[in-house]
Image: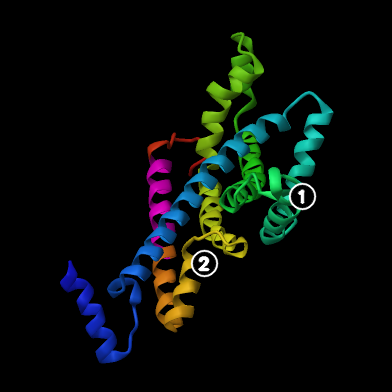
Amino acid sequence: MQEFFDWFRWLYDSTGINLTIFYDGFDRSRFVNGFFTTLKLAFSCVVLSVVIGVIGAWLQGSRLNFTRKIVYWYIQFFRNTPPLVQLYFFYFGVGHLITGPGGVPLVTNIQWAIFALSLYAGAFNVEIFRSGIEAVPTATIEAAESLGFSRLRAYALIVLPLAFRISLPALNNNLVNLVKTTSISYAIAVPEMLYVSNQIWSDSVNVPEMMNVLLICYVSLVGILVWLMHKWENAMRVPGMGHA
């Protein structure tokens, strides 16, 4: 393995292509940590945003007008304001109010990033699942009710699984966008890939090299997510239900 790393040192000496994340142990360590922080952010936000979407879509069908209004204004707020502004609002605005003894923040910057980005993507997911639910035949829901299913039980066991299949293509697009959007957590000093790359190119003056590394890493992450989502979509396909 050391020979592999030494080759990048030779590459730098011979051509000036300075990929310190390979031949410099310190840079390699902090970039790997940044990469795994990005994975942690992406995974957490994807899971939480889907949960928010599922719950929000169910609440949209509530018999209580107050509940529907809350979901409506939540969607309007998070869909119509920039995610970076939302991130600043929670981290600097709300975070300033949530402190312990001595003014020590009780919520870390990583936790705020996960919270803010999940709410942002969750607002889109609510609408995605709502459209999927509306595409489920009314006769199917009426059949469940005639069998004595409660509204929650019918939603969880019948409506949601069918709506999920229909919603997968749109959900795929939103989750891909979410993975890319995690890079804005750089703005509140979350040590993800963009943040540590900025540190590396500031120290080593290798901006072009690190920009290309970032591009390759994000294309790879998004490509893996798209591949997994397409595999999942094909596995859940029901002939005549949401597909040509």
Above or below, 171 against 211 in this view is above
Q: Is residue 16 visible?
A: yes
Q: Residue at x 49, y 60 (%)?
A: 192
Q: Nearer the viewer, residue 172 or 16?
A: 16
Residue 225 lies left or right of residue 148; in this view the side is left
Q: Amino acid at mark 2?
A: Tyr
Provide the major secondary structure of the magenta segment. helix
Please provide percent x and percent y for residue 132: 60, 38
Q: In the rendered image, which quarter is residue 26 located in?
A: bottom left
Q: Amino acid at mark 1?
A: Phe
Magenta segment:
219-234
Please provide percent x and percent y for residue 144: 59, 16
Q: Earlier in the sequence, mark 1 or mark 2?
A: 1
Above or below, 236 against 92 in this view is above
Q: Residue at x 54, y 62 (%)?
A: 183
Above or below, 15 against 213 in this view is below
Residue wearing tag 1: 77
Label 2: few (<14), some (14–19) or many (≥20) C-alpha neighbours in 10 Å: some
- Marking on residue 236: none
Please provide percent x and percent y for residue 223: 40, 58
Above or below, 163 against 16 in this view is above
Q: Nearer the viewer, residue 191 or 99?
A: 99
Residue wearing tag 2: 195
Q: In the rendered image, which quarter is residue 68 located in?
A: top right
Residue 72 lies left or right of residue 118; in this view the side is right
